[in-house]
Image (spheres, helix red, strand yellow):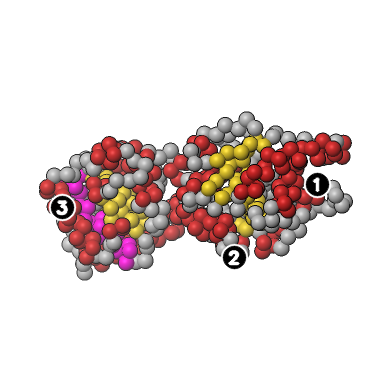
Amino acid sequence: MHVAVVTTFVEQFEAFSLCNVVATQLEMLRRAGHTVTFVACDGFVGRGGFAVPSLRHLRMPVLHVQRETDLQDRPAAFRSDIDFIKGRLRPAAATCDVAITHDIVYLLQHLAYHVACRELALEFPRVRWLHWIHSAPEGHRVFGRGDPRSARFTPFPFGTFVYPNETDAARVARQFAVPADSIAVIPHAVDLADTFDFHPLSRALLEHCELDRADVLAIYPVRLDRGKQTEKVVRLFAELKRAGASVQLLVMNFHSTGAHFLQYRTEIRAEAERLGLAHAELLFTNELPALDGVPESIMRRANVEVPRRVVQDMFRLTNVYVHPSASETYSLVCQEAAAAGNLLILNDDFPAMREIYGDSAMYVKFSSALFHTTYQPSEQAYYAEVAREIIAQLEYTPTLAQRTRIRQTRNLRAVYEQSFGPLLEGTWQGRQAGAG
């Protein structure tokens, strides 16, 4: 599908949220394999997502309306502006299947562009127009026949108005005199890798391993010594899954390529399978295949040691950190996980953990070099109880719940699959489709 994304951007401002919204939209379209023409005004020079090689470009003149009286004082000049814009925009309208505009149908200053788009919509009726509105709706206004200002308050031919929240969708409908259920509601996506400036390996892990899906997501950066008790994290995650949560554990096993490390990894993998964890729910970084976009040299190094930057990136995504290690002096990684907003789950059988991390953590009896816990009636039953408590913490602690919600429902894939894609591809069934 050929999509034209039409803006009146003159410059790419990093602090201008609309630039970031459009950049995210372009990335969703790129990932979905669409051909995209990006339209801005003369002088716009893009960076980042606005400068990818596959993106086509088209520029329009800078012809903004300064005040409503201009329309009465210089009608011939306004008409000339409309025709000039149409001339520049016509090649995109003639070739695209869908045209997406941003705030063009809303702002008075964009009225010449708006009217030009309306006339092109009638000239090319096969094109579907999707109009994103990024400002608070106005009250409905009525103008005389032929007054161009009426465009901002009337239906758009072959067009759908799009708004980012359900609450105000009815106000948008009233402004444009269209049925309330015709307003598409699509939340803004967040490009997690871009927002947090991820390392190339982190970006690839996020996409390849679909780290945005699980209810409970954790990493365990560890050398695969048996004293780190990685199998206990696996057992706990099996109980989380049995309790109804979707799970994913990424073991970032560094300096673990020796035979005894690989044997331990094999044992952990076999136990995970017996407990019902799928391969994608337990990943080891030194088992990863080559990943798109990651240089071979980085992948070779990651087989031995994942860059510390990648560990920090992953903590931006995860919501829990489980540390059952049998012996520690301090555990800096626990501190880093907590600083990134993860729920800490620490070893209650190693007393130093309470001294270092205080009461703002969950403490679980994992046994240690100092104390051995005997579980009654069984270790599995004990972990099942812990799993239920973790799920409750993630659900009812507002910061943890919101952290998980944003990762799962506002990522590029989720927003595209749930609302943007269906609207774009003509399968959208009503505005509730985008309200999740």
Label 2 sits on residue: 429
**Type of amino acid under label 1:** Arg
Label 3 vs 2, first from the N-terminus: 3
Of residues 242 and 72, which is closer to you in this image? Answer: 72
Label 1 vs 2, first from the N-terminus: 1
Gap between marks 3 and 2, in whole Å?
51 Å
**Type of amino acid under label 2:** Gln
The residue mark sitting in front, 1 or 3, is 1
Q: Residue 196 in the image: x percent, y percent?
A: 44, 40
Gap between marks 1 and 2, in whole Å?
31 Å
User: Which residue corresponds to the image point at 51% horizontal and 59% vertical from the top-left?
Assistant: 418
Q: Residue 199 in the image: x percent, y percent?
A: 37, 38
User: Which residue corresponds to the image point at 67% horizontal and 61% vertical from the top-left?
Assistant: 182
Give the magenta part as a residue range. 222-242
Element assignment for label 1: helix
Element assignment for label 3: helix
Label 1 sits on residue: 149
Of residues 370 and 275, which is closer to you in this image? Answer: 275
* Cβ atoms under marks 3 and 2 closer than 8 Å: no
